[in-house]
Every structure is written in C-alpha cells, then in structure tokens.
Image: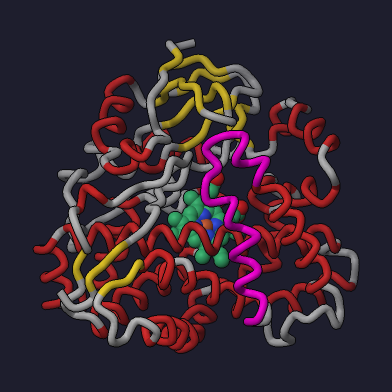
Amino acid sequence: MGETRDYDIVSPGFHADPFPTLDRMRAEGSVVHLRLPIVGRTWLAVTHDACTTLLKDHHIFARDPANAGSRTQARILKCLPRTLSLLAQNMLGYDDPEHRRLRGLVDQAFQRRTIEAMRPMIVDVADRLLNRLQGRTEADLMAEFCRDLPLSVICAMLGLPERDHDRFKRWLDGLKDTANIGAVIRAVPGLIRVVRYLRRVSRPAGGALPEGLIAALRDVATDGQTLREDELVSMIFLLFGAGQETTTHLIAGGLFTLLSHEDQRRRLQDDPNLMASCVEECLRHVSPVQMTKPRFATQDVFWQGRQFRRGDMLAGFLAAANADPAKFVDPHQFNIARNPNPHLSFGTGAHFCLGFQLARAEISIAFERILSRFPRIALAGEQRAIAWRRRLGIRALVRLPVLLNA
Ligand code: HEM
C-alpha cells in the first residue's frame, strides 16, 4: 500500500483555490491514499481515466459494500433507529439489479422532455425570488436566491405544498456543515423530523399535491410489489437531498466564478448562445460535488499500478478529474466557450446523475434571469473576502454578497 497522506481537501482555504492541491495529488499517481474526516482511510482516484474506470467497471467496483464481502455497513445500519437507517435504502446505495429497479421508477420523470416542460415553472420561481430584490442595491444571493430556487423547484416537482418549504430549510440547516462528527450528530434531530414528515406526506391524504412525483410514486407503492413505503420515503429524501444542495452550490459557485472573471461575463452577455457551454464550464470549474460516494473492490485486483484487496474502499475525486491536464487544455482557466468539455461533475456509469437535465435547466435559467434583471451585477467587496465552508465533498460558499447595480 502507498503512503497515507494528509491532503487538506476540507478547509475553506482549499475550497478557495483547490487547483494546486489537486495538481499535487495527481503528481503522486492516479490513485492516492489519504485519511479523511468521518470517512477514515480511503483511496481517491484523481485522474480522469482512473475516475471513469472506477465508476464504470461495475464488476470490479461495487457501491454496496456487501457485494465486496463487507458486513460493517449492514451492522452499523442495524444499530441505527429505523427512521435513519431507511435513508440508506436508495438507488445510490445499491448495485444492479436493485439499483436498476429503483431508478427505473423515476427515470421517466427526469427525462429531457419532462424537464423542458418544467422550464416555465422554474422561470416563474426565479422571477418571484428576484422580484424581492428589485429596488435594492445589495443582496446576499446565497440566502436570497441560490438556496431558494432549487428548494422550490424540487418541492414543486415532488408535489410538496409551498407552506412547508421554510420548515424544510430549518430542518436541513444542520447539514450545511458535515466536516466533523459533531456536526453530523447535531443534524440528526432535523433529519428525523424530515423523515417523519415525508412518511406522513407520502401516505394517501397526507398532503402531497396530486400532480407531483410523490403521488405518482405512491400509486406504484400501493401495489406493494415494486416499491415499499420505506423505499418510497428514502427515494423522496434522496431526490430532495440530491436535488437541492448540489444545485444551490453549482448556481452560487458558478455565479461567483463568472462575476470574478469580467472578460468571461462580458462574453456571455454579448453572446447569450454561449449559455450552454458556460453551464458546462461552471460544472467543471466549480465541481460542486467534489467526490463520489465510496466504491468497494469486489475482488483482489491489480489496478492503476497498485494492488487492491477485496473490500478496499475507493472514491472518485471528480474535482481532480475535472482539472486533469491529460483531458483538458489549460484546466485552471475558466473558459465559457470550452469545447469539448467531458467533465465528470455528474459522475458516470450506472449511477450517472439522474437530475443532470434539471440541474442544467436551473442554472441556465438562474443566470439568464439574473443577468437580464441586473445586467450590472458585481461581487460586493474583495473577491478574496468571500468565505467558503469547511466541508468534505461539496464546494460551498458561506455567502454570496453582490451589488445589484454596480
Ligand atoms: C449541480 C447539480 C448536481 C450535481 C453536480 C450532481 C452530481 C451527482 C453525482 C456526481 C452523482 C453520482 C454519485 C456517485 O456516483 O457516487 C449523482 C447521482 C445522483 N443525482 Fe445528482 N447532481 C446534481 C443535481 C441533481 C438533481 C437536481 C437531482 C434530482 C432532483 C439529482 C439526483 C441524483 C440521483 C437520484 C443520483 C443517484 C443516481 C443513481 O444512483 O443511479 N442530482 N449526482
């Protein structure tokens, strides 16, 4: 086994400028061994090639540790209260055929045509949020826009009533900082409230709107064959969790990056046709989801020049893959016209992000509406004064202070 390194991939300093650390890791090899808070010792694939194989070769690398001979996770889940352990019963934690069965139930709802049909609703949500800023000179777009847009959109898609949105925000607030075990424990009461609420709302006459995804899935669940109630609650929680935080930090980090690169921002305003490639470059450069969930070696295997044992834990460090000079010209550069841009921000393989079309639609609508309502928007204060959260795996700004009419 290689040397265990203490690379800092959690601190605000790392998140402010991740590229030097990512380059040092890649210089060490395509897979590095390090110690992470909460996760413990693990391997990280840090090149584009290694990440891609790790996520695509499902025979050698499994998501479910039980398929790699490890009973540890199953034992830990048994010790947890049912309310929490059921959250692990989602597609992202399983391998096929369980994974395929669960994903198949929601695939349709996330297809391009369905998401296209949601665009007017997303524009309406964005405009209503921006109306509140009209006439003001300054705003914190993190608190007043970036958090609210994905939250309202996913709630509308699921069919959760609008009056519950604020409660959700409060309950999930603790999850904003999960870089240490204390913060994770503090988040538990909020999580339990969310699960209880979702269980209630996913029952008949529980309050979910009839046109939403919860009602559609409940109809599937009532036959009891294809989806159990626990799986339904867990699925909603996954969609809700995966759809909100990730998109919030893509929009906030993307806007911050665009506004910090005056030339690129002018380029986009001069040529709105660059929006699609700008979105892809924000995904690559910001890499809001920095790493995948762990994979487990299903067998002893010699891979990327190293010997791995059955049960070894590895994760794809997407942020490092997205800055790999073997795949991207001038990877540190933020270039909104970059083409091709084969970033791995949505992962790859069987667990490729289900919500990628929705995330793309949300960020492009957010940028379009903000720049058309506030064409002279600028960062407020020194760029270096912008603070990043201490967090593992998600690149998250604390605030995004802007001058609306600079
Ligand atoms: C910027 C926005 C987003 C990013 C960067 C992102 C990133 C990712 C990544 C990297 C994975 C794979 C994780 C792994 O392989 O371990 C993933 C999976 C997933 N994402 Fe996203 N995501 C985003 C938005 C969304 C949205 C809006 C939704 C839905 C509402 C969503 C739902 C999911 C689901 C359900 C999975 C699991 C898929 C499976 O296991 O087959 N994501 N996402």
Q: Position of residue 240 (x, y in %)?
A: 62, 64
* Quadrant occupied by the C terminus: bottom left
Q: Is residue 354 visible?
A: no
Q: Is residue 223 visible?
A: yes
Q: Is residue 148 placed above or below 3 in the rendered structure?
A: below
Q: Position of residue 397 (x, y in %)?
A: 37, 53
Residue 322 lies in the magenta stretch: no
Foreground residue among 107 and 200: 200
Q: What's the magenta bit mostly, secondary-structure-wise?
A: helix
Q: How many marks?
A: 0
Give left or right: position of 76 versus 270: right
Q: Which residues are magenta?
A: 162-186
Write the residue at 74% across / 33% down: 73
Residue 179 lies in the magenta stretch: yes
Write the residue at 63% across / 36% down: 62
Q: Is residue 346 placed above or below 66 in the rendered structure?
A: below
Q: What's the image's color scheme?
A: secondary structure
Q: Is residue 22 placed above or below 370 in the rendered structure?
A: above
Q: Position of residue 298 (x, y in %)?
A: 65, 28
Write the residue at 58% across / 30% down: 39
Give left or right: position of 126 versus 387: right
Write the residue at 50% across / 81% down: 113
